[in-house]
Image (tube, rainbow, N blue to C red):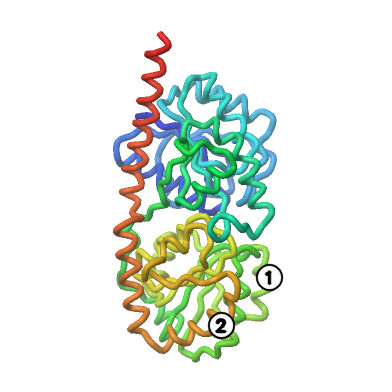
Amino acid sequence: MHIAWIGKKSPFCGNVTYSREITNSLLDRGHQVSFLHFAQEESQVDNWPNCPEVSLPFIYKSQVYTIPSLKATKVLTQSLCNLKPDIVHASLTLSPLDFRLPEICEELNIPLIATFHPPFAVKGVKLVSGTQFLAYQLYAPFLGHYDRVIVFSQIQRELLARLGVPEPQIAVIPNGVDAIKYSPGISSVKAKFQAERLFVYQGRIAPEKNVESLLRAWKQAGMSEGSKLLIVGNGPLKPSLEPFYGPEHGVIWLGFIADENRRIEILRGADVFILPSLVEGLSLSLLEAMACGIACLATDVGADGEVLESGAGVVLDTRGTRSQLRTLLPLFQDHPEITTLLGQKARQRVIERYTLSNNITQLELLYEEVLGKQQVQLTSNK
């Protein structure tokens, strides 16, 4: 099967990781993949799939949204004409081009599938950010024109259905992680940072990630000298937070780490992974930490609470996150038996529900279903 994948290659974010992992896996299973993306020559992503690429011109691009140039639609249409894929799969980049795709693919008679990424808050109803809710409201009328829309959880499916997207067109296929690559193993990270107990946050340093609540809780909890908190990632709030939470408090800022092997080594050496976000989709960073056998704490936003429910981790309430962490951090510091047990349960949950292999199998079945439906329609129209 030939899949034309439309997604992001930079700047680094969950959408980039999703595109990289899925396209690599499709290639491993013998499919043909062509990757269409908004080019950014100065940025390279590690472990990128070896497949034909098409660069789409753009005016502006960030981790959140992209503004294509006026030529982008013509370049995309001509490229799809030349490639002649069996199916187009768009990992939606929050771009005006997303709204043109159904029309373009209908004219070319190519089935179109979307993965819809925007994060949301608890139970998909009370969104913290009006901007996030606007994205759902804005996209819902257009998503109905895609042959299928992939979301990461039943909660997200229900939200889109309430906004008018036909339920039969919404497929729930959770994010998946390579549980062989991301697995428990030997690490020298604790020795490097002279840590007896190691806590990790990995993600953007931005308001919606609520990192300041974690930092304030850490400082107020009076953690021992042997406990360290690693902050992995960059973002707009880093310059304003880093001066107030430094090594004297046991906080170590590592910035963005592009090397996947180094990120895995950090996770393998950690005892606890913390994700205090106010909005999420389904965090790949959380799944990666769980797969490495780390005890995980995350807020009940997006699908993260669903991932950790029933004992696979600790689910935090977005109301009072700081006070909850202030209580839990010393507990997890002083009782390694708790973190060991939670880490084992986290790993088992990933194996049962969130492996990349299972994700790809579900995706292949979806492709076959959509292509089969197209064949039936073509036959009936003759």
Task: Quadrant for the C terminus, please.
Answer: top left
- Pick the residue in front: 78 or 147: 147
User: Which one is in front, 267 or 137?
Assistant: 137
Residue 89 visible from this viewpoint: no
In front: label 1 or label 2? 2
- Mark 2 crowd level (few <14, some 14–19, many ≥20, 10 Å Cα): many
Instruction: State whether residue 215 is above or below residue 33.
Output: below
Q: Earlier in the sequence, mark 1 or mark 2?
A: 2
Disc 1 crowd rating (10 Å Cα; few below 14, some 14-19, many 20+) is: few
**Type of amino acid under label 1:** Pro
Q: Position of residue 93 (x, y in %)?
A: 58, 43
Q: Nearer the viewer, residue 104 or 192?
A: 104
Q: Are marks 1 and 2 in contact (CB under 8 Å)?
A: no
Disc tally is 2
Left or right of 205 on screen, residue 7 = left
Using the numbered discs, state the Cα–Cα distance from disc 1 to disc 2 in whole angstroms: 18 Å
Q: Indicate whether 172 appears above or below 322.
A: above
Q: Residue furthest top?
A: 382
Q: Secondary structure at mark 2?
A: helix
Q: Which mark is residue 163?
A: none
Secondary structure of the residue carrying tag 1 is: helix
Q: Quadrant of residue 141?
A: top right
Which residue does the numbered mark 2 point to in the structure image?
A: 218
Quadrant in the picture for the N terminus: top left
- Residue 22 percent across, percent down from the top left: 40, 45
**Residue at 47% across / 46% down in the picture?**
151
Which residue position is annotated with label 1? 239
- Taking the view exactly as shown, the residue that stands out farthest to the front is 162
Residue at (33, 56) in percent of width and height = 353
Specify whether 64 is left or right of 339.
Answer: right
